[in-house]
Image (cartoon, helix red, strand yellow):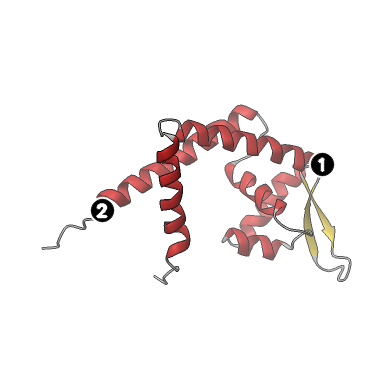
Amino acid sequence: MTTPDPDEPLAEQLLRLTRRVHRIQKRHLQQLALGITPAQSRLLRTLAHYESPPRMADLAERLEVVPRAVTTLVDGLEASGRVRRVPDPSNRRVIRIELTADGREALREVHGARRSAAEEILGPLTDQQREALGGLLDTLVDGAPDRAC
């Protein structure tokens, strides 16, 4: 007989919240009618954090996905004119990915949709509860190192 895990209800709540956040963010993205998936949105946001255009391998590492997944995302975003592949100036065999003007505009709209989704999710909380939740989330995200499974 196994003993019940006292953290199981909390783990289930976190999983339900994660699913709710994804669902609400996806709905807000769809309302923009940009034709951007949540995964493409994440790639655009990640690209914006680089000072110079990254390689596909850099994006795959940062996004914690296989390189093929990045290729698929870039293909879709390139077809819509939001990113472009450019040769590396120091090694023309290396391809880098950069945001286009359309990509930067889409990113602005995506940020707005994410803010709206966050407001919908956090709406029931008071300012004090939001502050407490922020502190707790910081502790959970930054406090414990990843453990190998």
Q: Is residue 21 visible?
A: yes
- Identify the amino acid type marked 1: Ala
Q: Position of residue 45 (x, y in %)?
A: 66, 48
The disc placed on residue 101 is: 1
Quarter of the N terminus within the rendering: bottom left
Q: Is residue 70 above or below residue 129?
A: below
**Residue under label 2:** 8
Residue at coordinates 73% horizontally, 58% vertically from top-left? 50
Image quadrant where residue 105 sits: top right
Three-letter amino acid code at the position of disc 2:
Glu
Height in image: 96 above or below 100? below
Does residue 80 show up? no
* x and y, in percent, of residue 63 in the image: 59, 58
Point 70% across, 45% down: residue: 76
Q: Is residue 48 above or below residue 26?
A: below
105 relative to 39 in the view: left or right = right
Location of residue 11 with respect to 89 vertically, above or below: above
